[in-house]
Amino acid sequence: MTLLEQAKKGIITEDMRIVAKDENREVEWLKDEIAAGHIVIPKNIRRRRDFHPVGIGNKLRTKINANIGTSPDHFDTKEELEKLKVSVAYGSDSVMDLSTGGDLSKIRKAIIHQSPVMVGTVPIYQVAAELLEKDHDIIEMSADQLFDSIEKQCDEGVDYITVHCGITKKAVDAMKKQPRLLGVVSRGGSLLIKWMKIHKKENPLYEYYDRLLDIAYKYDVTLSLGDGLRPGCLADASDAGQFQELITLGELQQGAIKANVQSMIEGPGHIPLHQIEANVRLQKSLCHGAPFYVLGPITTDIAPGYDHITSAIGGTLAAYYGADFLCYVTPSEHLCLPTKDDVREGVIAAKIAAHSADIANGIPGSMDRDNRISKFRSELNWEGQYKTSLDPLLAKKRRKASEDFSEDVCTMCGKLCAIKTSKS
Amino acid sequence: MTLLEQAKKGIITEDMRIVAKDENREVEWLKDEIAAGHIVIPKNIRRRRDFHPVGIGNKLRTKINANIGTSPDHFDTKEELEKLKVSVAYGSDSVMDLSTGGDLSKIRKAIIHQSPVMVGTVPIYQVAAELLEKDHDIIEMSADQLFDSIEKQCDEGVDYITVHCGITKKAVDAMKKQPRLLGVVSRGGSLLIKWMKIHKKENPLYEYYDRLLDIAYKYDVTLSLGDGLRPGCLADASDAGQFQELITLGELQQGAIKANVQSMIEGPGHIPLHQIEANVRLQKSLCHGAPFYVLGPITTDIAPGYDHITSAIGGTLAAYYGADFLCYVTPSEHLCLPTKDDVREGVIAAKIAAHSADIANGIPGSMDRDNRISKFRSELNWEGQYKTSLDPLLAKKRRKASEDFSEDVCTMCGKLCAIKTSKS
């Protein structure tokens, strides 16, 4: 039985108990929220017993994900495993292996094996990458090939998969009727749309959705229903294509619940600040309270090199209004594959966003760490401040690098430190 | 006649015309908003004719400020002048010279002379720094000494000054009745409170406010009414001390208008996300629509080393709800005096916040640059993207550093670039 099936039958599992305890919630309530599809605990049946389950969804602490993985232009398994370590060390609750270059199965297996946190993938990437390697195009993909790749990845142990099931002919038509500045920016989305256009067929992930549900059920893999038509710039935000797809995702989410398969909904992307609340509220309404997994959103297009900041702004707002799961964006977004340092900066920016929103939403215990560091500040206790901060190494290094500082203060104010003055 | 005096008399000046043109507003409307105290154009009468005036306030583009200046532990005039250059190059509308170490007059004069943007100071810093240098304490300050220092700095040409006039006995009492975790974190505030406590006297900036208004009037210097009791941690946000001071600042703002002196109101600091709207709306209400100048606010205390991000989050929200002027926070906040690189990162983070809010508020033309870069993205025109971004050098360097990239795409997706797939 899948976790959702058990929840629907009123069975409380060990994983539910662990998550309820971690979140300071009643396990009965948690079970009901899982049964309603408002909370998911992504965990493949292949996971070892000691894998620590994490819940995503309604009224839980906001979770964050770090995208790692190779590209056709740059692949180095060791480097990706180091990014995995960095992601986890700085507090990511999940990683997605988005590899599209090198030996994809080998990289994925290594990441799943070494990751103490849930692992997600986008199975169509492997199909596309393998076709590309043989100089073939995505249009040569068969539906069987796609589902075989999905089953292979589930069998290898991924905990959740992004599947762009909501890209239908209807959604693509809606998008075309309200023309876009930047078109389609989802890799998976663009591949499927190209395939659909050439073959004049419906999206196989939509047409054979039951087949997908069967695979997901078999391994208890959570579906992350992808937003292939997400806006790639502010000008394209909240348009007909995006919401036509979201309406379909809401229907598919209901199908998943019936099939005892957990699911969450992916969201954009590039959204101006004043549209973020509407985007979250509409997702919650159209998708029956399903967990909302957003990429960013970034609130301006003009900051390549600083999109960990633009996404922290949008992500905080999104989480405040109800988004449950933030996919980080790194400083390298729109420019290149992230380095290890980019991964650290991306994870910390997403963590800041999630944490700021949790405080604003009154998530129990969320302000404890802030109060601890503030007490250390009032005591001018620097070691205490370092160890309570999100990046103790950096904080210590920064203060120490500033020459001539006095023992108890820092070079910002020196002897004119307000806290020192107040104590004197 | 000061600018405010002219506005009240219905006179339209050249500076009003320039600002109205820059902001795409009617000059008559601008004049009325200045007369009402809703908009200020900080500019000392000593400024040369070619100094470009900038407006701050209601319905204008959100402006940003960069704090530069030495500390008792670290002073190097050349370095500060480089920080000035960086601030202006990356788009700061203002700098504040907060120097407290080295030859303060020399540094300040150099900054005023070289700055193409408005310059602000906190005059009490010089009094405190000079006493400290002679191993004396702030309690030895006389009211005359403080006002002489203020006049000296106005005579040297500063465009606006932070004066903590709202720290009254009543405000300090209110603060004590609702005890704080971190107490007073404003340097100027802590100095004045110490002075008041030892001398058992009212704050001279409050008691002799008319004397301050006379000086400001003489040089047409804008008062930035400081928030000495601003919260220094989330736990202390929005408390009695903070709002007792703000009530007084609202009264003093009315006094400034009567005296034909422009003024704006400073705001916190550390505020949890869900209290930002209330803080802005209350400032606007208690202070009669005066321009609101906020430091941050930062939305969590646990991110030293990343407070340009925490403040970009809070600053965006604050500006969205009506804050007019954002003081940057750099990655070095809470740790050390900022370096030149910190200044760049701080300015860009504040710029992102201001710009994101302006788009959300529908400020005319604010999305033009976003639409330009999005068009370049759709064309895979990289040079166009660099030149339209907030940091062209960094964007170009980042993409170029990523080896093996193909001509038209980047190493993020390589040949699987969604934009490329959509075109094929």
Image (tube, coloured by chain):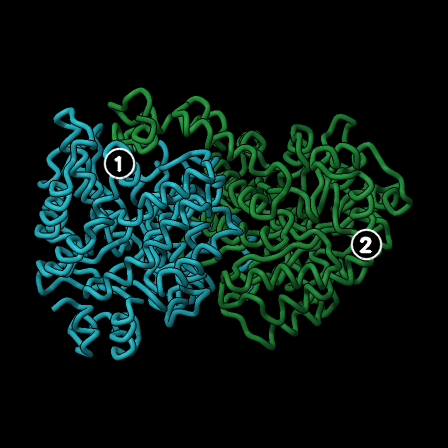
Chain colours: A cyan, B green
- In the rendering, at what x and y percent does residue B385 appear? 44, 27
Q: Few, some or many C-alpha atoms within 10 Å of disc 1 (few <14, some 14-19, many ≥20)? A: few
Q: Which residue is mark 2?
A: B256
> What subunit carries mark 2?
B
Q: Please, is residue A388 above or below residue B81 in the view?
A: below
Q: Which residue is mark 1?
A: A200
Q: Quadrant of the N terminus of chain A?
A: bottom left
Q: Please, is residue A85 above or below residue B24 in the view?
A: below
C-alpha distance separating marks 1 and 2: 71 Å
Residues at discs 1 and 2 in contact (Cβ within 8 Å): no
Residue at the top extreme, as displayed: B407
Q: Please, is residue B20 above or below residue A4 in the view?
A: above
Residue at the right extreme, as displayed: B9
Kind of residue at disc 1: Lys
Whether residue A408 is visible: no
> What subunit carries mark 1?
A
Whether residue B190 is visible: yes
- In the rendering, at what x and y percent does residue B294 appear? 60, 52
In this view, the residue in front, A127 or A64, is A127
The residue drawn where x is 21% and y is 72% is A16
Q: Which image quarter: residue A14?
A: bottom left
The residue drawn where x is 46% and y is 45% is A239
The residue drawn where x is 14% and y is 28% is A133
